[in-house]
Each structure stands twice: as structure tokens, then as C-alpha cells.
Amino acid sequence: MYDSVIFDHDGVLTTLVELSVLREATWETFATLGVSDPDPDHVEKVVIHVTPEDVHSVADTYDLDAETLFRTRDELASAAQCEAIDAGHKTPYDDFDAVRRIDAPMGIVSNNQQATIDHVVETLDVADLFPTAYGREPSMTSLQRKKPDPYYIERAMDDLGVESPLYVGDSDSDIVAAHAAGVDSAFIRRGHRRDHTPSPDPTHEIQGLDDLLTLDGVPVLDSTETAR
Ligand SMILES: [Mg+2]
């Protein structure tokens, strides 16, 4: 039996934002830091899937401090996503309420910014449902700690006081991070993953959050109990 369920956020609990939202925030980052005409290739390097090497090489090119570049980029990307949430462009998936029938502690571990995750938890009023909810802190240290590193999953397990969670994600890095933390994974095949072959193999594959309720080992409220 799993003693808890921990979720990735983007593409699992809430829909993805258009890449253009993150791209625009990155252009705004350069403008904010006084770089009015950056090379589009350099901007592109720090939009998503950013590595410390990317940040350093782009910062060096424009004589910027790498930490400042990254923090500004994270703050603006988070602000843009919070706006998208408030405008109803980034929403919980239709099957979100299924998680309310899970009868075990739950948490969130996301590679998104902590400010984005905090905003979602507050907006959806789900702090009780997810007593631990990690995003990344807006510093370059977080780039070493984000998934596929198990760092934040292990912290969430400590917070919840659990040992055998199921981790639910929509990316290969989610599966790698879960297995690195020594826990089972469930790959959720949302629409944007229709043709994806997960690697490594996840422990389970599900089509949506409803499927979690029929998965072996996931504790579920019985039909007489009110959803959380
Ligand atoms: Mg995701």
C-alpha cells in the first residue's frame, strides 16, 4: 500500500501555459536588466530546461551577474504564469477533484517556481489537501536540486513523514526523480504526451487522475465518505 501520493504540478494538476508566455517573460528579463537587443538564440537558451551552464554563458555574453539574470527570469516567469492562472488560461484539469478521494497524505513537487506553486495552492484553496508543496527557490542552487534530482521529493517525504509515496508526473524527469528517491512512479498520459514513450519505464501508466483511484495500492475513501 502507498502511504501517500505526491504530484508533479504542470501537466498533471494544472494545464500547461503556452510556451510564448515563458518566452515573453524571458525577453522582458533582458529588457529589465538593460539588454535591449539580445540575440534570440541567447534568450531561447534560458526560456525552459535551463542549466547552470546556460545561465553562466548567457550572463557572461552580456556582462550580467548570473544569479541576477536567473532570479529576474524566474520572478518574471512566475508573475506571467500567475497572471495566466488568474485570467483562466492555466487551469486545473477537469479530473482534478479525483484527488479529493485519495485517503492518504498528499504533496506537490514541481520544477516551477515556488511563487507559482504558492499562487496555485492559494487560488485553488488546496493548502489543506497539499500540506507540502514545493517549487524551486529563485536561485541557481535550485537548478542542481530540481528533478530529475530527488532533492525536493525527499524533502516532501520528510515533511509528510512518509516512506512509500507514489509520485505522479508527466515527464521522464519525474520518473527518474521518483526512482532516485526510491519510490514508485505513475506516468500520466495527458494530451500533450499522447505520443510520448516514457523513459525509464514508470511503475504505472494512467490516462488521468481518475485512474489513480483504481490503481493497486492507492488508498481511496469508500463511497460513503465525503471527498476531502
Ligand atoms: Mg510536469
Image (cartoon, helix red, strand yellow):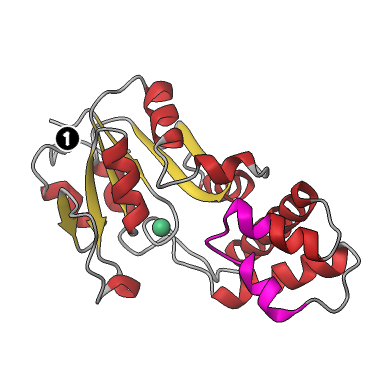
- Give x and y (percent) for residue 73: 72, 58
Image point (80%, 50%), residue name: 68
Side of 21 relative to 92 (left or right) = right
Side of 141 relative to 65 (left or right) = left
Q: Is residue 149 above or below residue 53?
A: above
As for residue 166 lying within the magenta part, the answer is no
**Quarter assignment of residue 86:** bottom right
Res. 227 visible in picture? no
Label 1 Cα crowd, 10 Å radius (few <14 / some 14-19 / many 20+)? many
Nearer-the-camera pick, 135 or 107: 135
Q: Is residue 37 above or below residue 100?
A: below
Q: Is residue 105 above or below residue 112?
A: above
Image point (24%, 77%), residue name: 195
- Give x and y (percent) for residue 41: 66, 78
User: Which residue is the extreme one toward the left?
Assistant: 216
Q: Which residues are magenta?
A: 39-55
Image point (38%, 63%), residue name: 93
Could you say whether the residue bearing mark 1 is in a helix, strand or loop? Answer: loop
Side of 74 relative to 213 (left or right) = right
Q: Quadrant of the C terminus?
A: top left
- Give x and y (percent) for residue 213: 16, 47
Ligand 1 in which quarter? bottom left
Q: Quadrant of the N terminus?
A: top left
- Give x and y (percent) for residue 126: 47, 42
Q: Is residue 41 above or below residue 91?
A: below
Image point (70%, 55%), residue name: 56
As for residue 43 lying within the magenta part, the answer is yes
Nearer-the-camera pick, 48 or 131: 48
Q: Which residue is disc 1 drawn over?
A: 219
